[in-house]
Amino acid sequence: MTHVLITGAAGSVGRMLRTRLAHHTLRLLDVAPVEDGPEDIRTADVTDLDALTAACAGVDAVVHLAGISSEGPWADILRVNIDGTRAVLEAARLAGVTRVILASSNHAVGFQERGDGDMPADVEARPDTYYGVSKAAMEALGKLYADRFGMTVTALRIGSCFPEPFNARSLATWLSPDDCGRLVEATLTTPLGGYRAVWGVSANTRRWWSLAAGEEIGYHPVDDAEAWADKVLAGQDEPDWSTEPDLVQVGGAFCRTPLGGRMH
Ligand code: 15L
């Protein structure tokens, strides 16, 4: 039985993982209310090092999801996403937790050309927003703690983690809730140490990104967004995948969103 701390447990990915990781002993942390349950529930801000260190006590792994999940003002992104990630890694180190899973994003590399199913998971950072910069910083912090302190840190470059794909881009970038559970389970059990990045994506027919790094740690996705293609593309022509602005770069519309703008 693994003891796992999930930060950002009240968010959408946190709620998906809560049920899918229920065979572990879970401690759930968020600044927002977490629905009551049998787990150990903690309320804290992700920059509160003392509260995080206490929350890390006795756990085997931390799954760090807390943060602003799309573009926002720089001061907010800096505090919550970058300071917050530093605090989580430092708290894990202080508490002797050696395994941390970081919820990074495709937007860390949003200005990369999208790839054709073969883009490696460690492709160089090319952030598309301040949000993307925070995910690149998250990954750099993960490398720092892996290299300096020997921690096992996996950065999940998550595509679009929603119940269903909802537009043409997400037919390529979708990570199903069940595959998200499979991916995190692999990160919790892999014997491989050190830092690595893996794509958080399902086995989509139109996938842009390679599954190789995920397969190395035992992530074998099952779902394919193609099952929703008819519904998603109903009433429209097949998009031109080589010219449609949202389909040529990894980050899609984020590459054109105003910096610092609120998207949600
Ligand atoms: C993300 O990183 C966001 O958190 C999510 O809301 C989606 O926008 C996703 O990327 C995506 O690229 O579809």
Image (spheres, rainbow, N blue to C red):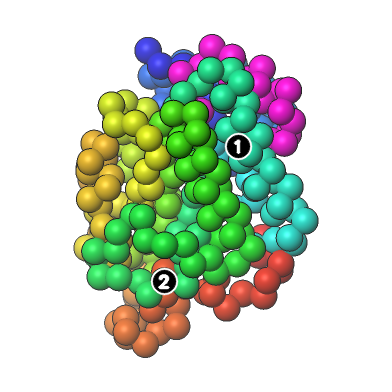
Name the spot of residue 10 as percent of width and height, x first.
61, 36
Q: Is residue 39 above or below residue 225?
A: above
Using residue 46 as the reference point, say whether residue 59 is left or right of it.
left
Mark 1 lies on residue:
8
Q: What span is colored magenta in the figure?
A: 45-62
Name the spot of residue 12 as percent of width and height, x first.
54, 44
Q: Residue at x 50, y 33 (%)?
A: 148
Q: Residue at x 42, y 57 (%)?
A: 159
Kind of element beneath mark 2: loop
Q: Residue at x 35, y 71 (%)?
A: 114
Q: Residue at x 64, y 63 (%)?
A: 130
Q: Amino acid at mark 2?
A: Gln
Answer few, some or many: residues within 10 Å of disc 1's Cα (few below 14, many 20 plus, some between 14 and 19).
many
Residue 20: in sight, yes or no? no
Name the N-terminal-most of marks 2 and 1. 1
Mark 2 lies on residue:
112
Answer few, some or many: residues within 10 Å of disc 2's Cα (few below 14, many 20 plus, some between 14 and 19).
many
Q: Amino acid at mark 1?
A: Gly
Q: Quadrant of the C terminus?
A: bottom right
Examine the structure image and report whether residue 55 is included in the region drawn in magenta. yes
Give the spatial CA distance, label 2 vs label 1.
28 Å
Between residue 170 and residue 194, name the one nearer to us.
Answer: 194
Kind of element beneath mark 1: loop
